[in-house]
Every structure is written in structure tokens, then in C-alpha cells.
Image (spheres, grey):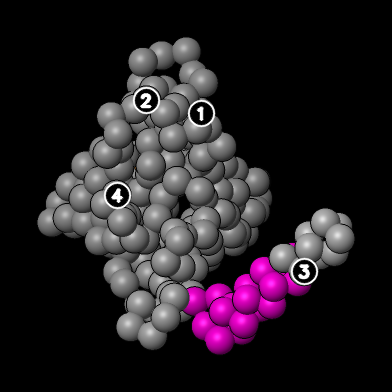
Amino acid sequence: MAVWRGFECLFIFVSLFALCCGQWGWRLPPGYACVERPVQAICRLRPNPTLMSSEYRDIQGIVIFTQRITCFGHYSLQVKINIAGLPANGTWDYHGIHVHESGDMSRGCESMGPHYNPYGTAHGSPRDPESRRHVGDFGNVVKDPFGNIQGALFDNIASLVGRTSILRRGVVLHEMQDDLGRGINRESLRTGNAGRRLACCVIEPL
Ligand SMILES: [Cu+2]
Ligand SMILES: [Zn+2]
């Protein structure tokens, strides 16, 4: 008899659960709608006007950010990168790419400040935990022999929503490979020794 009571309780529990979730579609009641929605932003890369070398004057590109938001939190940020116009020098090269603190382009890419770092941590790799990287650390992208960069990455730390949102901040593409904080000098823990700022843009909501 006791066994049957257990089954009865389970049956009632499952029925109520199905009824509630069926009615609300896994959402909160009307007025507290928890609808999953995508948030998108775009950044249109332009060459750094303060850079003297002419070999980087033709850089053009688009970075598209997409993130799914629910009332329980948000999913990882998808970053699609499509850049052209780098030197077609026949080699594959790594270039550091980061979100920098400021969306200010009044002095080209130089006025965008340091890497976006709201937690005051050291520079690192996008695969490092939050305590050992900047929020803006996206690591490196790869340029093909024809001067194009095409790629997509997912980031669990940077976000388009919340207190440390990257919206209206700057994306900077660098001349050198980012050493991801593993270099031998102090600069490695600040900038990854990624060198000059070749191109940049402001992250605008779509
Ligand atoms: Cu940078
Ligand atoms: Zn950094």
C-alpha cells in the first residue's frame, strides 16, 4: 500500500508540473514574461588614422556580436570577425584583438584606452578564468596569405548586457601576435606585447 502511495504522489507531482509548464511554456506568468531573445551589436573596423605606415591604410572589416539572453542569465557571446585589406604578403600571421575601455575615436585608435578591465586583473588568454584575464581579452585572429581575417569565437566572460557590458567600447586589431600574458616582460601582463593599433571601431547596438 505504501508503495502505491509513493506512485500516486509521483503521478500528482508530474501532472501538476506538466500542467504548469505547459500553460506557461517554461516561462513566468504573463507580466513577468521570460522570453529568450538575441541581442546583437556591430563594429565597423576602420584603419587607424594616426598610423603612419601606408601598408595598413586599406583595412576594412566588420565584427558582429550575438548573444542570447534569458531571465535566468545569458549565454556565451558569439563574435564573428570578417576583415580584409591587410598586407597580402603570402604568410599566415597572428594578430591580437581586444575590446578596449573607451569608444572614443577622437585620436584614432589611440584614444580608446587600455584593454577593458573592470576587475583590475592581469592580461591573459580568452581561455583563462575571469581572475587571470581582462574582460576585453579576445586573444588572436589569423590573417591568411591574401590579407584577410575570417573567424568566429565564443567568449564566456565578455557580454553585451549587465554591469560590465562591452557595448559602446572599442575593438582594436593589433600589428603583432598577443602573447596572452605568457611573455617574459612586464608588458605581457598589460597588453600581451601586441604592438601597434592597426584598426579599430566602436561596438554599436544593432
Ligand atoms: Cu588591444
Ligand atoms: Zn588584455
Say which residue appears at 60% left-offset and 59% top-offset.
151
Q: Would you say residue 173 is visible in this rendering?
A: no
x, y (%) of residue 100? Answer: 30, 46
Indicate which label's residue lies in the foreground, 4 or 1.
Answer: 4
Q: Amino acid at mark 4?
A: Thr
Q: Hey, what amino acid is under mark 2?
A: Ala
What is the quadrant of the C terminus in the image?
A: bottom left
**Residue 97 position in % (x across, y down):** 44, 46
Q: Closer to the N terminus: mark 3 or mark 2?
A: 3
Magenta segment's dominant SS is helix
* Label ID, residue 8: 3
Using a 10 Å C-alpha cutoff, classify the residue at mark 1 as few (fewer than 14 neighbours), some (14 to 19) or many (20 or more): many
Callout 2 secondary element: loop
Q: Which residues are magenta?
A: 10-27
- Circle 3 or circle 1, nearest the eye: 3
Q: Which secondary structure, mark 3?
A: helix
Residue on which disc 1 sits: 179
Q: Earlier in the sequence, mark 3 or mark 1?
A: 3
Horizontal arrangement in the rendering, residue 200 relative to residue 179 (left or right): left
Visible residue check, residue 13: yes
Where is mark 4, residue-wise? 164
Mark 3 neighbour density, 10 Å: few (under 14) some (14–19) many (20 or more): few
Mark 4, Cα crowd under 10 Å, few <14 / some 14-19 / many 20+, is: some
